[in-house]
Amino acid sequence: MAAVGQPNVIGAQPFPAATQKRGQLRSVHGSRVPYAQADAGGTGDTRIGGSSPAAGPNARLEGMDTIALITGANKGIGFETARLLGGAGATVLVGARDEERGRRAQATLQGEGIDARFVPLDVTDEASVTAAAKWVDAEFGRLDVLVNNAGIAVADGGYLPSQTTMTALRRTFETNVFGIVAVTNAMLPLLGQAPAARIVNVSSGVGSLAWMSMPQGPMRDIVSVPYPASKSAVNMVTVMYAKQLRDTPIKVNAANPGYCATDLNRNTGFRTAAQGAEVVVHLATLPVDGPTGTLWGDLWPEAVGEGELPW
Ligand code: NAP
């Protein structure tokens, strides 16, 4: 396992804490988000061109339980996403490939008063994905939020493109890309049963071709194939689902949590996992006229704050 991410440059920003109480899950927006102001229903700035046909602002979130599945929720950004969504009143389905780690996360969240349920889910295992969808169907009959968070960064050869092994490339894409497609397809019927579901694919700034190509940017020294290319693929996957679903109430967006200290990068990130999760929760709780088919999140290295990133 190798550390893959953005260079260690100090640039963390404070995020507003999620202050919603249980049973009052609403969108989590900062004032820097231009589309957050237009919260009055109707069509909004949906880059893909969807018309957001839903009943009214936050229709799905008012007065009903929100069922949210997070993959890879036993630690890191996924765990903090479960904690934030659960703390805001959602029932969180804690997807984890390892039962012990999943149950431990479930217990921690339940200890904080969160309605957390462990779901065995290895995103690379078709049978596991199918079984998870069946379980969600049997328990809830719908899914309001899907967070495709599970991800890995491996480099079992060298770091450079010329040193990339097919094993590292396949493993990375299997989890980071194919896993998203597998889980999303399995859950789509359930997402369609929700009034206005949200899908968040956890991507990364390192998947942005625009940012990676900046000659003088802080990413100029990141020269590697598996992880960055997998996140570029996640971005395209996001756009394609957003296009297919543009005439439905379902919104599909990619999140850039920023460089967060987690096991993925041997805890070298300068943001906390909770700060990264704020970005994810923002997209998971978009109002009816929020965007679909965007890459949104931490704007470093272009700027300080959160906003839409270039692909
Ligand atoms: P992390 O702490 O290593 O967590 C990764 C999670 O994914 C773990 O729960 C892990 O489970 C799970 N996972 C891995 N393979 C899986 C599989 N096949 N099926 C189900 N779950 C699997 O890393 P993180 O930083 O929180 O990463 C979360 C997401 O954020 C990833 O998509 C990552 O690419 C993205 N991201 C992270 C950063 C950052 O700076 N940390 C920046 C941008 C994007 P186990 O515990 O069983 O391994």
Image (cartoon, grey):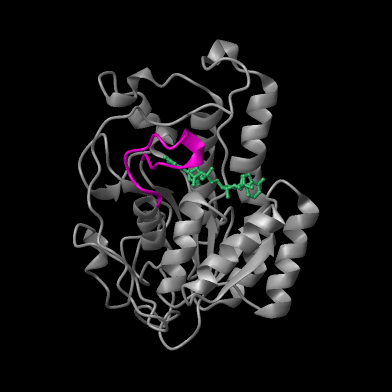
Specify start and end residues of the magenta stretch as a single range: 259-273
> Quick one: which residue is furthest to the top in this view?
162
Does residue 252 appear in this view?
Answer: no
Nearer to the camera, 128 or 263:
263
Q: Position of residue 236 (x, y in %)?
A: 51, 42
Q: Quadrant of the C terminus?
A: top left
Q: Can you give x and y, in whole percent of width and height, for residue 152 in the image?
A: 57, 38
Please give left or right for residue 31 compared with residue 103 in the image: left
Most frequent secondary structure within the magenta stretch: loop
Where is residue 142? Give x, y as percent: 62, 76
Q: Residue at x 19, y 57 (%)?
A: 32
Asked whether residue 76 is in view, the answer is yes
Closer-to-camera residue (175/59): 175
| Depth order, front residue of 65/215 | 65
Q: Residue at x 65, y 79 (%)?
A: 140
Q: Which residue is most to the right?
A: 127
Residue at 77% x, 51% y is: 126
Q: Does 269 lie within the magenta span?
A: yes
Toward the bottom, the furthest residue is 63
Q: Ligand 1: give its quadrant.
A: top right
127 with respect to 31 (left or right): right
Judge whether 47 appears above or below 66 on screen.
above
Q: Quadrant of residue 74?
A: bottom right
**In the figure, is residue 23 to the left or right of 179?**
left
